[in-house]
Amino acid sequence: MYLYNSATHKKEPFTTHTPGHVEMYTCGPTVYHFAHIGNLRSYIMEDALEKYLRYEGYDVNRVMNITDVGHLSGDSDAGEDKMLVGARREHKTVMEIAKFYTDAFFDDCRKLNIKTPDTVQPATGLIPEFITMVEGLLDRGYAYVAGGNVYFDTSKLTRYHIFFDHDEADLEVGVREGVEEDRNKRNKNDFVLWFTKSKFEDQALKWDSPWGVGYPGWHIECSAISLKYNGEYLDLHCGGIDNAFPHHTNEIAQSESYLGHPWCPQWFHVHHLNTPEGKMSKSKGKTLILTTLEEEGYDPLSYRFFCLQSHYRKALVFTWENLDNAAGAYRKLIARVAALDPGDGEVDGAVLEEYRRKFTDAVGNDLNTSLGITAVYDALKAGTNDATRLAIIGDYDRVLSLSLLEKAAVKREEEARSRQTASTSGGFTVEGEGDPEIDAIVLRRAQAKKEKDFALADRLRDDLKARGIELTDIPNGAKWKRI
């Protein structure tokens, strides 16, 4: 497999510290609000990456944090803790907010067929480990105490900027909008490892520490959580491109300084989901959540399909028209899969293996899920029997996770029910989807028409329409379907 590495700015063969085993870390959500669909794009692509690695035969240990303390609204040690902002907004405690939005996040993941990582660790559950790591950085000379807070000293590093070549002027305190100068910092790039009450008094969650009552900085949590559950050598770190700086940059700085050796060689960053007006962002009020898509009538998996059609390193533009196109294509794809006959022949193992190689050649080139979708259409046209075509598609769906076989099976059942009929003694036939209640209403309408009670017949037809039933009169009967 080849994967683009954000740290080296090139596509490289994927390798691991232990052959056949992947230690993988994913930056999780800050649970102060619903994850918007831009956030969910990152988790969809990371899920596809994990599943593809397993498809290739790797044993994967994937770890993810839940940020429920310490993520400030400015990302760069400025502003308030986002959890406190959320709690104040909804008149709840911070932990009530954290539980509600953590549950909501995993509910979204379930709807999108995103696998739960092997380990999920809330930041508030690992405070002693954060303190131990901060103490270690102080002991090694990479941190200092000033104004009651503990800071990482970036001047001790040979190289700080890993992912981008920043213009130093762009990082000057006061130049970036909304960043207040912290006079305790020795260097403008230094960042907080541990806050005390000197930051602000109304922080909801606080713990005792050697430096006073306080709470951890945002960046320390991912490093400490990964060290605990992935070990000292992390193979693959994932996240949204907006986390590359400062969050992931600071993770590398503190982790390698603490360990004394290289930490994570491979970095995977998913690019933004944009609207025509720009990046989707909670702070800018430009957000859509998965529930909104459902309320508009979209299957959540049509959004997954929409994301998989684009490469993860390209910004993806969301419009309702674009989603409509993806949803329509997804429905048509399911219909084509449903048209295949599972009883048509036996699975041809040689053909299945041939198409597996085609899939790995396509998707294994920097997680090209767009070509993975194309491979499904190619499988539909494969010169083999339907049983083998279905086996190929099911194999691909181990990575794509679009529930193609499951939804196709449901569609076949619906079509089978639609061919069922019910008849009156007078020979009036009802063709529908096998719902006895709807059949009975159609028969009552027919009887009303026969008795020339057209007002009742019209009222029954309107009742059916209100239930989403389209009714068509046919010779000697009627046909109905849900719309």
Image (cartoon, rainbow, N blue to C red):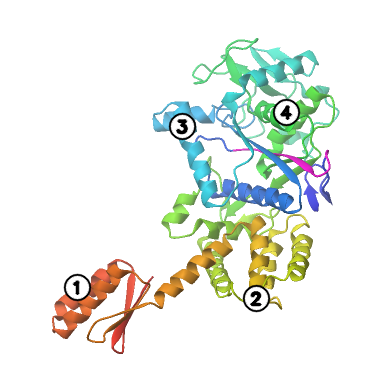
Which residue is at 67% across, 17% downward? 131
Q: Mark 1: which amino acid?
A: Arg
Which residue is at 16% across, 75% downward? 456
Image quadrant assignment for residue 342: bottom right
Q: Is residue 468 visible?
A: yes
Dot 4 corresponds to which residue? Answer: 227
Q: Residues within 10 Å of mark 4 (few under 14, many from 20)?
A: some
- Is residue 26 on the magenta stretch? yes
Which residue is at 21% across, 73% downward? 460
Q: Residues within 10 Å of mark 2 (few under 14, many from 20)?
A: few
Which percent across, then down, holds residue 313?
71, 53
Q: Is residue 465 visible?
A: no
Nearer the observer, 457 or 131: 457
Disc 4 secondary structure class: helix
Magenta segment boundaries in residue numbering = 17-28
Q: Seen from this angle, which residue lies furthest bottom?
A: 475
